[in-house]
Amino acid sequence: MARIGNGRGRTTYAKSGVDTRARARSLRPLLAAVTYRPPRSHGRPLGPAGHYAGLVRIGRETIAVTTDTVGTKVLLAEQLGRYEEIGEDAIAINVNDLAAVGARAAGVVDVINCARPEPTIFAALGRGINRGLAAAQCALLGGETAVVPSLLKAIDVGGTAIGFFPHGRRPVTGAGIRPGDRILGIPSSGFHANGYTLIRALIRQKGIDLHRPRSGARTPLGIELLRPTRIYCRAIESVADRPYVRGFAHITGGGVRNLLRLNPRVAYVLDRWPRPTGVFSWIRTLGAVDDRELFQTFNMGIGFAVIVTRRGVGPAIRALSRAGYGDALEIGRIAPGAGVDLPAWRLSYSEYS
């Protein structure tokens, strides 16, 4: 049964140092101050605002651009002395956002800010970046390395990705999602690169040894937590041009609320969401975070969602399986109304922030 409450006495993302509501409030005046619009000859920005990737129309072509960092997962990497995984994460978090609008990744520019350059760390990052590029089938176009000892004590890793729409493909924004459509989910490989400020706070509070396996596992917990973000590019390429596809969602920071970045005028009823297992079951058994906070912070086992018509469920699952994502499954449906509902946990979310 879900633990429902206001979070008093429990650990939350805000209490651990990341207040997403405060971030949203701070962004409003920033965005309000940006009023400049370039001449049409320099490209025409396309909506909707707040989607996974920014879209700009240049002549007859539409380009998708997105940027993100690995965040405080780098502190876990530093603690364990392993950096390949976060190199792969830096690619994954960006190309997955491109995939969420149906764009094909063309290339990535990485950025590394550090207190001092360490060749062994950079080599490990490079190996991870290379794995990510191979999985996404895109190129490293360049990068920026800044040595800022007065600004950072650790290292900050991220990047910017650019994508395009091949063969006349149109951006998939989710605007066509309708009641009766179905929601498919593709499992994640773990926490990906989100919520690590909260995870690290729990590890400190509980005195957890990262070098020992959690109950029921054989791999040390630290290695499980560092597992790289799964890359979904090939999955989306297998279905992006199909007429039964209505929308895509990268279930990243914000958890299931990410679905609200698509069509906000329908309800996303996740009545077939699989029971959390692995590290997601582990974090629930710690008992320090309620389910509402978990589902609005982490992906909770599903890293990417594909919204299809009712008749598209079978063809989509077969196409995803042929592309190497045979674990895709139906997790919910679209209904009249608004918000995201998880009936089994008696949870509802009305906004993304």
Image: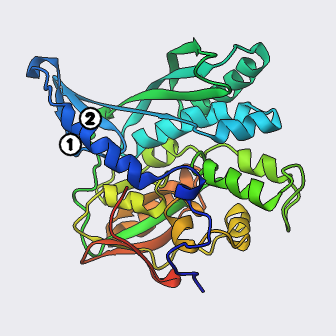
Task: Find residue 218 and report its horizontal and vertical position in percent.
Answer: 89, 58
Does residue 291 appear left or right of residue 183 in this picture?
right
Does residue 246 appear left or right of residue 304 in this picture?
left
Element type at mark 2: strand
User: What is the residue that sits farthest to the left in this orientation?
Assistant: 40
Task: Find residue 292 and report its horizontal and vertical position in percent.
Answer: 51, 71
- Please tell me in which quadrant of the rendered image residue 286 appears: bottom right
Quadrant showing the C terminus:
bottom left
Q: Amino acid at mark 2?
A: Leu
Task: Find residue 297 and report its horizontal and vertical position in percent.
Answer: 52, 59
Element type at mark 1: loop
Inter-mark Cα distance, 1 to 2: 7 Å
Q: Residues within 10 Å of mark 1 (few under 14, many from 20)?
A: few
> Taking 132 as reference, is 207 above or below it?
below
- Report the residue marked by disc 2: 55
Q: What is the tally of numbered marks visible in this picture?
A: 2
Residue 47, disc: 1
At x 81%, y 38%, the residue is 80
> Taking 243 as reference, is 237 above or below it?
above
At x 40%, y 51%, the residue is 22
At x 65%, y 53%, the residue is 189
